[in-house]
Structure formats: C-alpha cells, structure tokens
Amino acid sequence: MSQLNVKANKDAFLKDLSALISIPSTKDATQAKEGAPFGPGPLAALKKILEMGDRDGFRTKMLQGYAGYIEYGPEDAEDYIAVLGHVDVVPATGKWAHDPFTAYVENGTLYARGAIDDKGPTMAAYYALKALKESGVPVKNRIRLVIGTDEESGCECMVKYNELEPMSLFGFAPDAEFPLIFAEKGQIRAWIKLPQAAGDAPVHIASFYSGERINMVPDQAYAILKGTEAEKWSGHVQDELKAKKVPFTEEKTEQGIKVTVKGQSAHGSEPAGGVNAAFLLAAALKDLPLIPTEKAFVDLLADTLNNDFGGERLGIKYHDDISGELTVNAGVIRFGEEGGTVSLDIRCPIKASLDELTKTLTASIEKLGLSIGELGTSKPLYMDPKHPAVQILKNVYEKHMGLKDVELLTSGGGTYAQYLDAGVAFGACMPNYPYTGHQVDEHVKVDDLLLASEIYADAMAELGNLEK
C-alpha cells in the first residue's frame, strides 16, 4: 500500500511527545496504591496518553492503573492486533547535559529519558494509528495500542493485562531495533542474600550502595567506612582508585568516611557496554582488614562477579547458535550491618534450560557461603521467521528502507512481545544508530522516530487484514 503520511504532523508529534516526556514516570513502590500499582508517575503518564486517544476520537480503556489501550478498527471485530509500548522509564541517574524530563532537540536529535525507551517509540506507534485512522484504509481486525507501566521493573502490568483482556491474533513491541527481533533471550532475576555483619575489626563497611534498577549497569557506587582505622584505610582505597584512574569523591559524614566512585550506565542486557561502579569500588576495598561477612561481600563483587559478563565463574556460561552468549548484570547492590543483597539480571540464550541454569547458579552461590533469596524467571521468545505476520513486517520495513533480504535479529533484551502468544519486537531504533536506552543523555533522531511511525502505520494497515 502507499506510505501513510506522518511527517506532516511533526510539530504535533513533538508537542505530544514532549508532554509525555515531562512526566517523571519511574516506578515508586513506596507510593503504590489501588489504581496506581506502580506509584503516581507511571499512572500520570498512562493517563496522559489515554487523554490523547480520547482527544483524537479513539476507543480507550484504563485497566486498573496497570495498563490501558487505545483502539481503532471495527468494534465488533473478533480479533485484534496488539502494538505494545510502555510509558514507565528507568531513573535518570548520572550527570545529564539537560533536564532529562524536558525534551531537548538539538541538530535534529531529541534528548530525554524515554526518548528511545520507550516514550518516543510509543508515540511513534500512536501517530501511526492516527495516520491509519485519518487515511480511511479499511481493516478487518482491530488495532490496539496497549500501553504498559511496569516494563522496566518486572512487567506486572502485562501479567494483569493478560488476566483482564483476550489474547491478540498477533502483535509487536516498538521497544527494540529494526529490522525485527524474532528471538529474545530468557531471563533469570536472582537476589543473592548476604548475612548480617558480625565481629570486630579496625575498619568496617557501614554501608555500600550502588544501582537503582536490576536491568541497568550502575554508574555510581559509594561505601561508608567507619572504625578506629577508617581514615587510614580510606586513604588506601583512594590511592587504589587514583592508580586505576577511577573518578571518585570523598567526604566525612556522621556515619563515617564516604567514598563515591563513578562508572558508566548501560542496559542490563549488554553489561559489557557499561562500567559497573560497584565493581570498581569493591576492587579498591579488597585489601581492607574486614570481618569475614564483609570480606565475603567484597570478594563476591571484586572476584566472582567483576567483569565476568558471561557467568563463567558462576558456572553458567552458555552459548547457542540462535541468540549467542548468556550475560550477567549485577544491577542493585546494598550492604550494611544488617546484611544485604546483590541482584543478578541473567539473560539466557534461547536453547538454555532455565531450570538447569538456576540449579547451577544456586549451587555456585552456596559454595561461596551465601544463598539465593528472591528468584524469578521469564521464558525466552522465539517466532518462526517465516510466520506470515513476521514476513509482513519484514516486507514493510524493506519497502520503506529500499532494501531486500534484510537479516532478522535476536536480542538479549526482553520486551512485551514475550507476553504474546505470537509476537516480535519491531523497531524503533534504526540500524547503525546507537541504542541509548538506560544511558545518560538518552537520545534519538526525530526523523528516525517519524520514519518508524510511517513504517508502523503501513504495518498496522497490513496486519489489520491478517488472516487467522
């Protein structure tokens, strides 16, 4: 079919996207309540985009604050196509050049938290739905833009959505890369429990803190040292950091001497792409004369986990010919006198057995004298690349890009597509452009979002007539 016009609405697109970006929609479990299960920010963002749907004459529905949808097409159609976006974002940690919750455009590039993950792509999908509606192109299936609010912290929103709504005929998540991702790794999310600190020594770790989300590489970590020799050993730590040219600051607090180091954030599915601040700090703490429980904590970070992104030291290294290597990210680290936790976000290749990997992981942690507390898994996604709907998306993308026989992708990242009986991740990051989700100064080209929107519009029109 002919290309549906989205670029003509560029100003309106940016206005609506800017309004959505301006809402700091990070999850806040401390303010969760009925109707706002993930706190006020995600709910406000959900309400904002549903208001846009009402304004533009779509059918909309709020689903108990967990999710909502905006729908077009014959109301009595038996089947629908799901387009799954999310409006929650990870925290805007680190030093940004501009306010992360104000859309800033420079030389055609938009900078903001959520620019590419996933407010920008979700808005691209919304404007695609608008273009389809305005075109009058007939569709026999309903097209439903489903908006979630907990993608970054466990996807409880999609679990609830599937409880409340029937399954779609097919769907795609605009929350990854083009041309198309047909396979996504499974996940193990494990929390290593660290025992309560007990014993006496000239220096103690009063507190260790790093990371805000399990699926982010932490870009900052601090340790507070106390004890009769805290000043001496703080100097040693600082010397170690200086020798390795690690950026750090030091200050005296009521609790003790606080040393803070800087790393570099990245998405937890690609931990080698960042610099884990917790590893840097733990390595500098190695020589301290700590009590056994504190030493076990430091050794876990500095020796067992430090830059072992493939899980070899944990005995869980794995590779397959579909999705490549297993990866491990230590994202949230907390430790003090009451003990603590270290989170692991493990992305598992398609052919790996989650049960076997979990057993091996548990045994490896127990060998260290530690234990696993919380543990959860998510199954991998695999769609046959020859599936008719996958071929529709591939062909639409190739037509817009002037390409033939593009190679479809696999990913370590998990998207809402895993919650569909049939679905894939489809854009919105263009090839040869860096994916900056979860990073400082997250950004995307405005024209890339508009191009993605036009691709989505044509894809919706084609899928709108998909046969069972």
Image (spheres, rainbow, N blue to C red):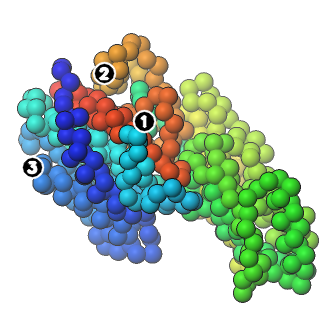
Residue 362, image x and y in percent? 70, 54
Bin the neighbour count of mark 2 within 10 Å (Cα to Cα): few under 14, some 14-19, many 20 and up.
some
Judge from the rendering whether residue 63 lies leftward or rightward of residue 56; answer left or right. right
Q: Is residue 210 left or right of residue 435?
A: right
Q: Amino acid at mark 1?
A: Cys
Give the CA distance from mark 2 to mark 1: 15 Å
Dot 2 or dot 3: first in sequence order is 3
Vertical arrangement, residue 280 with respect to residue 80, above or below:
below
Q: Quadrant of the C terminus?
A: top left
Residue at the front extreme? 107
Q: Which residue appears at 83% of the width and 59% of the height? A: 242
Residue at image position (78%, 61%) is: 282
| Residue 57: assigned label | 3
Residue 245 percent location from the top left of the image: 79, 54
Q: Earlier in the sequence, mark 2 or mark 1?
A: 2
User: Relative to the observer, which residue lies in front, 441 or 321?
Assistant: 441
Within the image, what quadrant is residue 399 found in? top left
The span from disc 2 to disc 3 (Cα, nearest Å) is: 28 Å
User: Pointer 1: what residue?
Assistant: 429
Helix, strand or loop under label 2: helix
Look at label 3 and name its amino acid. Gly
The residue lying toward the viewer, choosing from 356 and 94, is 94
Determine which of the numbered discs, if any, sits on residue 400 in the image.
Answer: 2
